[in-house]
Structures are given as structure tokens and as C-alpha cells.
Image (cartoon, grey):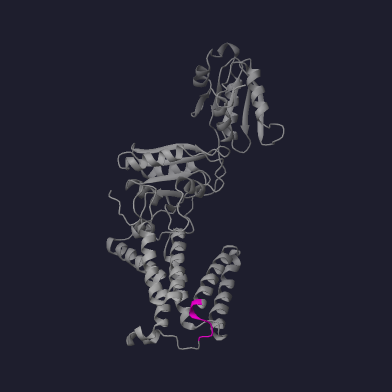
Amino acid sequence: MKNMKEKEVGSSFHDNLAWMDQHLPVEASFDLIKREIEIGGRNAAFYFIDGFMKDEAMLKLLDSMMKIKPEDMPERILEFSAKCIPYVEVEILHQFDQVMKNMFSGVTCLFIEEYEGCIAIDCRTYPARGVEEPETDKSLRGSRDGFVETVVFNTAMMRRRIRDPHLIMKMESVGKSSKTDVVICYMEDRVDSKVLQVVTERVEGLTLDDMKMNQQTLAEALFRRKWFNPFPKFKYTERPDTATACLLEGKIVMLVDNSPSALILPTSILDMIEEANDYYFPTLTGIYLKVSRAIITVLTVFLTPVFLLMMQNLNWLPKVFAFVAVKDMVNIPLIFQLLILELAIDGLRLAALNTPSMLSTPLSVIAGLVLGEFSVQSGWFNSEVMLYMAFVAVANYTQPNFELGYALKFMRLMLLVLTALLNWIGFLIGMILVFCAVAFNKTLSGRSYLRIRRN
């Protein structure tokens, strides 16, 4: 017997149903429905998944089909789909692998006696939440909608903003088992054709069994990055307006079904630190926000290492900044204080993710009091160290990209350890390594992370 990819839907109604019943666990799975009826005096059978089908639409279709008389039945399946099915999205399938893929995607498949082929009626609906603004990517102005887990809704939100025939949305199926829908979106007249070709070839050439982690699985499969370089290769956004702006700049946006965010490429370090608020304000305000975020981003990396370096070399400290020196007794070396607080901040962040919303505020206050006031009084930490680490913890939230935040954190930890071990030489080596990690970080397009793309 031919395999599924080569097996074609024949004209024998009973053979088609026997093949479907053999490969579908209709009896074992309660949500796989087989509904046998009679249309125009001929036997017919529907295959669909309960929960994906629009009941109202199917009731109207069944009512229309039940009224067909035997003498009105067309001879060909194409004529039947054109004249007897009052619905918009109808397709004729001739291979069983297409039938199985469509049915598991929620499409209703209809077999009719004496017709060679399967009629696919796309009257599906997916469970979906509202398109409210994402929690981690808010804007003071602008739209308040956000991507959801249904890829068709996400493409519609971008189509609503770009009413141009040059906007292309190409869908691919990735994963042997999951068959996850991946959409490649681009402006045909603005995109870099070489980058588009690389992306398309890589997506089409993927040989994954499944996409368990949706977008992250796709990102790792498209570009296998070096483990020692933590800087992200892609930009993520949950805002349709941000994705639309990137499309109009000539970038490529990739959407994955079941994922409420878009993957944007190619990108640079400047793209990573941008956010929607930069463009919803006047030019001067937007420039100020960008510059402020860039300065704070640099400070999150170098503030505590520079402080440690100055404390190890007090004679380098100018008299003007003599007040920053640690005045209390140092019971624990500064490097260990800084590393312990780095770990403690991540612990608090993980605790906040798993804390019920009604308890998050009181627990945050308790944690702030215990770790702030009492830890200093007990002699574990110095007040200056607590101050600088508090700044770093808060400053991390000014940067919208979560992956970039942790990449900067790893660079800061490397600088701290090297400075503690080798003093100024270690700090200099760390500076060089940070620059190299950014400068030699290649994106999917092969460009440097520091390269500003020409529109």
C-alpha cells in the first residue's frame, strides 16, 4: 500500500471511509466525530473535530444539503462544491495526507458517494481570548490591542493596518507530528530579497518532529546560536502596531500558531532597546526616551563593576566622589555581596511570577523590608551595595526585551568576577569581551549586531 503522502482519494466511497476509519481513532477519541448522512440520494460522511466547528454554519449547510434532490446532483465534485455548498471557504482535496492535515486543523471533511475527492469546508473556529493589550509591552498612547494565540486573528490585525497588495503572508507547516502553522510576513516591495530567501529556505527545510515550545523551537531551529553568546538573535513583540511598523521598514515578521507574539528579523542592538512609546510621542520626547534608555542600559552593565573596581583601588577615587566609598564595616567581601544580591533578585522575580496577584503587593513590601533594612542592620550587606543593586534591579525593567535583559546581566556578572580576580586588568578584559560579544554577534541575515539596516 502507498504511504499517506502518495495515497489518493478514490471514487469508491466505502474504500475512502475504510481508509479514514483505519487511520483515525474515531472510536477511541470522543472528539473525533464521524457523521454519516444522505445527500441527494447518495451516501455521505462528515469527519470533523468537535470544538473546532461552527455549529450555526454547519446547521445551515446541512439544511441546504438535505434539500438536494437526486436529480439535482451534479456529475462532478467541482460542480457540487460550486452549486450545492452555500459557503465561502470550500476546497477539493485529492490526497489523504491533505485530508488528515486539514481535518486535524479543524476543517470539516466531506466524502460523497461516486465523487472522486474530498470536500474540505473551512467552517472552523478556535477558542481564543480577547485581543487586549499585552501586560509586558504597554504603551501610554496608541492602540490597546495585542496578539493572541490564533494565527489567523494575528494576521488580520496586521492586514487591518496595512491595506496594500504588497503585503505577503506565506504559510508553512512545520513539524512532522505537530504540523504547526508558521506565517512569514513581508512587504514584497521593501523586503531584502536575499534575507527573505534565506528565511524561506530554512523554514521549508526544517525537519522537526514537533514544535513543543512554539516560537522558541522555531528560533532555535532557524539559527543555532553559540551558547557562550547570550545576546538574542531575534526581536519579539506582542503588539500588532510594532510588528506593522517593522514590516513597513522592510523587515520580516514571523508568526507561529499558538504563540501570542511575533518574531522580527533582521535586527540590531538598537532595535532591541526600542519600544512603542518612542514613536507615540513628539520627536524630541522620543529621542529623549531612546537616549535615556540607552544610558540606563549601559549603567546596568557597568555600574556595579565600576563600583567594585573603585573600592579595590580607593586611591583612584576622585575627592569629588569620595562619598561613594563604603563607610560601614565590610563583614562579607563586596564581590560576594554583589553576587548574592544578583541571585536574590532573580529569586524575587521568580517568586513574583508564581505569587497570586492578590498577595503580590503585601509580599513585595515584606520582601523589601526584610532584604533592605534588616539585611543591612544584620551586617550581611552594606547600604551602598544595596543601593546600587536596587538601581540595577529597577533599571532592568526599563529595557523591554526580556532576553536582552538577561544577556546584559551575564555580561555584568562576568565583569564582576573578572574585576574581583584580576583587578583593573580583569575589568579591561571584561570590557573587551563585552564589546566582542556585541560586535561579533551575527543575526540570521549574517549582519553584525551593531549594523544599522538601511531602509
Q: Most extreme residue toward the top, as rendered?
A: 71
Q: Residue furthest right?
A: 27
Which one is in front, 267 or 280? 267
User: Which SS does the magenta portion mostly show?
Assistant: loop
The image position of residue 191, as x and y in percent, is 32, 42
Task: Give the answer, above or below, for where 179 lies relative to 79.
Answer: below
- Which span of residues is magenta-colored? 330-335
Name the residue at 53% across, 31% down.
Answer: 122
Residue 279 vs 336, above or below: the answer is above
* Rendered location of residue 414, percent (x, y): 45, 68
Whether residue 298 is in magenta: the answer is no
Front residue of 437/103: it is: 437
Q: How many marks?
A: 0
Vertical placement of residue 104 versus 433, above or below: above
Is residue 86 rendered to the left or right of residue 247? Answer: right
Q: Examine the rendering and report whether any part of residue 43 can be seen.
A: no
Depth order, front residue of 110/2: 2
Asked if the magenta segment contains residue 334, the reply would be yes
Considering only vertical position in the picture, is 411 above or below 440? below
In the rendered image, residue 386, in percent from the top left (x then y), is placed at 49, 79
Name the foreground residue: 41 vs 429.
Answer: 429
Residue visible at 51% across and 81% down in the picture: 333
Instruction: List x then y, in percent, for residue 330.
Output: 50, 86
> Which residue corresponds to the image point at 52% horizontal and 14% vertical from the top-left?
76
Query: Seen in the image, is 401 located left or right of residue 187?
Result: right
Q: Is residue 92 visible?
A: yes
Residue 203: image quadrant is top left
* Quarter placement of the N terminus: top right
